[in-house]
Image: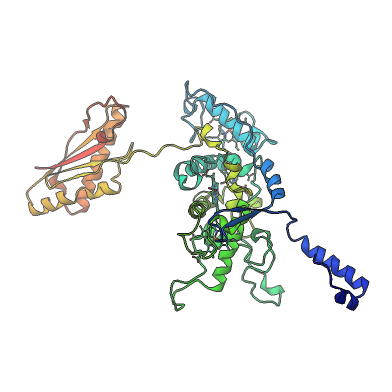
Amino acid sequence: MTPVSPSFSRIFSRTTLTSLALVGLALLTGCERPPVDTVQRGYRGTGMELVYNPRTQAELIPANQPPPSTPPAPAEGPKAKDIYKNVQVLGDLSIAEFNRHMASITQWVSPAQGCNYCHIGENFADDSKYTKVVARRMIQMTQHVNADWKAHVAETGVTCYTCHRGNPVPENIWFTAAPQDKKSNFIGDLAGQNLAAKTVGLTSLPYDPFTPYLKDALPIRVNGTTALPTGNRSSTKQAEFTYGLMVHMTQSLGVNCTYCHNTNSFSNWEGAPPQRVTAWHGIRMARDLNTQYMEPLTKTFPAERLGPTGDVAKANCATCHNGAYKPLYGAAMAKDYAGLVGAAKPPPLPAPLAEAQRSVLYFGVGSATLEGEQAKGLAQLITAMAAAPRSKVAISGYHSAAGDLAQNQELAKQRAFSVRDALLAAGIQEARVVLSKPVQAEANLAGEDPAARRVEAKLQ
Ligand code: HEC
Ligand code: HEC
Ligand code: HEC
Ligand code: HEC
């Protein structure tokens, strides 16, 4: 505290001074005890400084260490799906690798409860515990993050431990806040704020900035893009929600605003550090996990696990980050778990051949549906058929030489049917469509060949 000037002490009695000093002390406890450190993150004079407290950092480091990992088991030998009865996601792992995954999942999610947190006695195939059903979906969610959200998690990826840290219920989760009980107060509408909530760093900003941004997709903006308020939702209220989310992001990562912004203009992307782009993807990823994985599980959870409005627990930045700028300070655990890094995306299909006399359309593995671009490959053929009303079209379905012959032939037939149906839907009469027998494509020794999964349609 600054020393009190002599004239000041003459006016106040000793007791008043003591109590003032106490008030001062009380106020100071809200601040961080010095010394704090700063790191320069931009050109000098631009205010691009990160302020941090070495003591807070010292506590965070041991709290964000990865657990010891066991070495990967051999990938050879019978697969889990060949031996076990009810393996729907991890079936392609070898038995040894599957068991290692189960042991690690137990260590990450339910170390105190053990295997029986998800399983019943000796019948590991039984699905009657909700925890097992949730866990299966969680495995898929983890695969999805690692395979499809590289724009955020890069090669570091996540495992169950990133969120769970040895707890069945992760420490940092959120629920939609219960609506304000307006009967019992005279203040009026609090607009979801003025409660000094922990979620927004004990400020009086809106205490649930998650529902609008990490579940719904409202714009995260403080400035409108139009001069007049026409259609402009960027009200003061929205600005408060935006700042609420920003405070949450800052706290979850243990950083300042300058980690992602050049504070001379918060909305400007050009001057902002690259971390802002990573964060932008992080917001979309959290929203995706909450709406595509967590919310559909609502009915699977027992009522006591649900929030005040009956919603399921959801993830925010703190669920994974837990105070660190990268979860577990960037320790890459996921790469050691084949079952969690996710199936590689299948290669894209070749472009369809679209000519007036001949169309060739390609299909995904095991699929008989004309997807995306492929459906458009028939347009020129249809035009040519309309111009020559007596022409006919011959359709042949091809299948690969690998696998079960009867199954392959059936699939080739179904693929030919989809092409026929597309022609009929375009107004071609059924009598003009001739279906040929399924054809086995030339064997491809190099492995799976997308060109084998095709249907050819020729004008006759
Ligand atoms: C957090 C939940 C969870 C824990 C804890 C857990 N498992 Fe599992 N277990 C699962 C899920 C989910 C599946 C199904 C995986 C799939 O469908 O791919 C499964 C499947 C199995 C199966 C295959 C059963 C069959 O016949 O279909 C075995 C065996 C198994 N677990 C063993 C274990 C052992 C041993 C432990 C303790 C070391 C353990 N699990 C701990 C969730 C869990
Ligand atoms: C992005 C963070 C995240 C990841 C990664 C994650 N979980 Fe979860 N998990 C959650 C959230 C959030 C809940 C909901 C909390 C609750 O149970 O109310 C949850 C709940 C669960 C539950 C139910 C616990 C209970 O008692 O209600 C199980 C079991 C579970 N997870 C297993 C797993 C397994 C196994 C993995 C890894 C394959 C995993 N989780 C990965 C966030 C995550
Ligand atoms: C981890 C990165 C990160 C941190 C830390 C962060 N922000 Fe942001 N901020 C973003 C991203 C990303 C957006 C854009 C969000 C979007 O458009 O979806 C944004 C948007 C904003 C906007 C809206 C700009 C506009 O166009 O209207 C303001 C204002 C803002 N942040 C202020 C802050 C303040 C104040 C802090 C510190 C309390 C802060 N931010 C901390 C990443 C961050
Ligand atoms: C599913 C877990 C998960 C969630 C949820 C998550 N992150 Fe991340 N985040 C990660 C991982 C893993 C990395 C490390 C990526 C790497 O090594 O480059 C990361 C990295 C980052 C980085 C880059 C740090 C740097 O210095 O390069 C920023 C910024 C970030 N996250 C912001 C956010 C924000 C903001 C949210 C919430 C809107 C969020 N994250 C939610 C897992 C998560």
Seen from this angle, which residue lies furthest right? 14
Tell which of 443 and 22 is nearer to you: 22
Residue 248 appearing in the image: yes
Tell which of 285 and 414 is nearer to you: 285
Seen from this angle, which residue lies furthest top? 77
**Quadrant of the frame with the C terminus:** top left
Which residue is drawn at the image coordinates 68% and 59% (left, top)?
A: 198
Residue 313 appearing in the image: no
| Percent x, y of residue 229 | 46, 77
Quadrant of the rendered image containing residue 206: bottom right
Left or right, 179 with respect to 43, comes to right
Picture layout, residue 209 above or below residue 131: below
Picture layout, residue 287 above or below residue 120: below
Which color scheme is applied? Answer: rainbow
Left or right, 23 with respect to 63, comes to right
| Percent x, y of residue 419 | 23, 45
View quadrant of ligand 2: top right
Which residue is drawn at the image coordinates 80% and 64% (left, top)?
A: 1
Which residue is drawn at the image coordinates 59% and 44% (left, top)?
A: 327
